[in-house]
């Protein structure tokens, strides 16, 4: 019996309950009365779902899609722990956040268990066994679109590994909400409808995609219900048969057949051999806080720790929030972090990563001294690029002391923009995260080298940074973000905002961001990140800025160390999201 989830709770998405009323039912007085009530309800829901922090005592779930957050809370209320909730949210986001939530991609899960153990689950995609380092050298766009771009997906085995090892509920219970959401559909918010509309031309190119994500060839509109029957069947098969149906059964066969038909190199062996790894985390201290964060093949944790270690030498708070001096220092810390990221890191199953050196306080002290030597910016050649934001992060905690921080991705929006046959889900384009053309920028402008070159079975280097922050043995924050390389700076700035600048969680998340990665040689800024005079001062020292759109979305939790109360913060940049607690 699948009793854990009350599917009707989907109605907690206010727009859903409003839109599901059939207008034919309304007449005369009742019609007027219902319109007034609906208006009041809509007003209440708009107010209550604005990105306001949510406070709770028993459990909290935060994601960029409120229905998925509600699924997490329903699982906690049904007696599940934070790991159960995180797995259920992972599947739910695969339905209600199809750009980014996924079963056709991969990611990382950072966990603190109530028994004090910290763990890291690596379910990053792998290069197919027929891949080779030169496969994209003379190809344009093939690492971002179509079957050659696809890495062997890890999400299904990753979520299942977490559930089997650390969850308490059954796979069927956990997956029921996602299956129902796919079967019955969910109501698209204006933000989500606009996102789907942006990709209409790509969807039109693929009949298997168009059949689901276009309505009679046209984009869905806000208020429309998006039903995903094929995805529901796929999820039901996984719920029933476990990951074997994905990696050895009809799902693997369908993907491999479609890949062969369309010039891809995926084989059944790639799927059968896919494995998930549980490894040690990256740990570092910043001003008395302990961070537990992502290990390779993500660069995120190492780069974050390197930057924080450098910044610990400087009195950022005393210099003032967004003063030219503090911005310049943070930018220089980012410069070193990204330079090391791009040259020195790769999949630890294939290359040696100098982790201890990169996150050592000694190394950071040397770099801090370099930063102090001159206030002028070193010059690089400018490289331009187009940035997108299309991964997703979510955070969840229960009242037993378990905390889970997950970032998972298809890489680009809707991944490689392909769906194999009747599987119903997008496949990733994670091959582009390798150094596909060493020394040349990828889609995020990252210029990477040999350690991250393509090899059969290797996992591409990532920037995903699911993080948990602790003090004196207690959790104080859970956070992470999408945003490609900007993931690292989004997490960094959110932490600085809380720790150095004493902001509330919501202020810290919503504050305009900036990012610097060496190449391109300008500081990417969100509108209003710096005031005019500060920009002029920075220019004097040789730091130029460029305003960019599409920033990551930090979905985070903070815990009050005195009362144990959770505060959840959904990034205001993601109006479909919510922090929900109970
Ligand atoms: O693993 C990575 O670093 C990238 N594939 C993440 C992509 C991402 O965050 C997209 N959003 N901008």
Image (cartoon, rainbow, N blue to C red):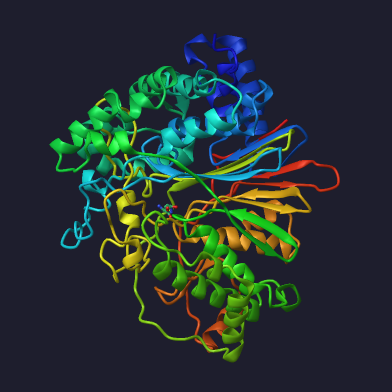
Q: Does residue 523 appear left or right of residue 252 in this picture?
A: right
Residue sitting at x 33%, y 32%: 213
**Quadrant of the snapshot with the C terminus:** top right
Quarter residue 435 falls in:
bottom left
Q: Is residue 533 visible?
A: no
Count numbered badges in the picture.
0
The residue closer to the viewer here, 9 or 241, is 241
Rendered location of residue 28, percent (x, y) = 57, 10
Does residue 516 sit above or below 429 in this rendering? Answer: below
Q: Does residue 416 appear left or right of residue 577 in this picture?
A: left
Rendered location of residue 391, percent (x, y) = 45, 47
Q: Is residue 93 visible?
A: yes
Residue sitting at x 71%, y 38%: 115
Rendered location of residue 185, percent (x, y) = 44, 23
Does residue 2 sit above or below 145 in this rendering? Answer: above
Does residue 233 sit above or below 574 in this rendering? Answer: above
Does residue 345 sit above or below 222 in this rendering? Answer: below
The residue closer to the viewer here, 524 or 225, is 524
Quarter residue 451 falls in:
bottom left
Rendered location of residue 323, percent (x, y) = 66, 77
**Quadrant of the snapshot with the N terminus:** top right
Residue sitting at x 44%, y 54%: 297
Q: Residue furthest right?
A: 562
The residue closer to the viewer here, 446 or 364, is 364
């Amino acid at each position: 019996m699948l009793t854990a989830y009350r599917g009707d709770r989907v109605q907690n998405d206010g727009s859903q309950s409003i839109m599901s009323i059939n207008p034919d039912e309304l007449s005369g007085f009742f019609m007027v009365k219902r319109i007034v009530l609906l208006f009041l309800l809509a007003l209440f829901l708009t107010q209550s779902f604005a990105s306001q922090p949510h406070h709770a005592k028993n459990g909290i779930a935060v994601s960029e899609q409120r229905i998925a957050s509600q699924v997490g809370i329903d699982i906690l209320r049904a007696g599940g722990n934070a790991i159960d909730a995180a797995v259920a949210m992972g599947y739910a986001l695969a339905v209600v956040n199809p750009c980014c939530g996924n079963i056709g991609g991969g990611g990382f899960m950072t966990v603190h268990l109530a028994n004090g153990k910290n763990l890291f689950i690596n379910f990053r995609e792998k290069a197919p066994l027929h891949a080779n380092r030169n496969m994209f050298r003379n190809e344009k766009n093939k690492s971002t679109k179509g079957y050659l771009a696809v890495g062997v997906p890890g999400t299904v085995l990753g979520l299942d590994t977490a559930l089997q090892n650390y969850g308490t509920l059954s796979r069927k219970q956990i997956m029921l909400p996602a299956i129902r959401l796919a079967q019955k559909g969910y109501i698209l918010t204006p933000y989500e409808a606009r996102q789907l509309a942006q990709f209409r031309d790509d969807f039109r190119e693929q009949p298997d995609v168009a059949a689901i994500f276009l309505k009679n060839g046209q984009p869905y509109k806000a208020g429309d219900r998006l039903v995903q029957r094929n995805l529901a069947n796929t999820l039901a098969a996984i719920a029933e048969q476990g990951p074997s149906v994905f990696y050895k059964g009809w799902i693997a066969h369908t993907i491999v057949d479609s890949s062969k038909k369309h010039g891809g190199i995926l084989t059944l062996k790639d799927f059968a051999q896919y494995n998930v790894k549980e490894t040690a985390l990256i740990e570092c201290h910043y001003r008395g806080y302990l961070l537990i964060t992502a290990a390779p093949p993500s660069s995120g944790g190492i780069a974050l720790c390197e930057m924080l270690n450098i910044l610990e030498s400087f009195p950022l708070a005393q210099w003032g929030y967004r003063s030219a001096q503090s911005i310049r220092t943070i930018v220089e810390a980012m410069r070193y972090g990204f330079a090391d990221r791009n040259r020195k890191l790769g999949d630890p199953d294939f290359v040696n990563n100098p982790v201890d050196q990169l996150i050592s306080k000694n190394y950071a002290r040397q770099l801090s001294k370099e930063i102090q030597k001159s206030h002028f910016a070193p010059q690089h050649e400018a490289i331009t690029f187009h940035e997108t934001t299309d991964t997703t992060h979510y955070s969840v905690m229960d009242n037993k002391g378990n905390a889970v921080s997950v970032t998972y991705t298809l890489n680009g929006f809707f991944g490689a923009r392909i769906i194999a046959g009747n599987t119903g889900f997008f496949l990733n384009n994670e091959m582009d995260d390798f150094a596909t053309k060493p020394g040349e920028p990828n889609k995020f402008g990252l210029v990477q080298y040999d350690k991250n070159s393509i090899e059969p079975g290797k996992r591409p280097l990532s920037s995903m940074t699911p993080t948990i922050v602790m003090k004196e043995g207690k959790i104080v924050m859970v956070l992470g973000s999408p945003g490609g390389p900007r993931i690292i700076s989004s997490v960094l700035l959110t932490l600085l905002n809380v720790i150095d600048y004493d902001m509330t969680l919501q202020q810290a998340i919503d504050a305009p961001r900036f990012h610097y990665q060496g190449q391109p040689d300008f500081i990417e800024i969100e509108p209003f990140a710096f005031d005019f005079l500060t920009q002029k001062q920075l220019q004097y020292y040789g730091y130029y800025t460029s305003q960019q759109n599409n920033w990551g979305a930090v979905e985070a939790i903070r815990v009050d160390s005195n009362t144990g109360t959770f505060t959840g913060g959904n990034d205001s940049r993601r109006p479909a999201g919510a922090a929900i607690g109970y």
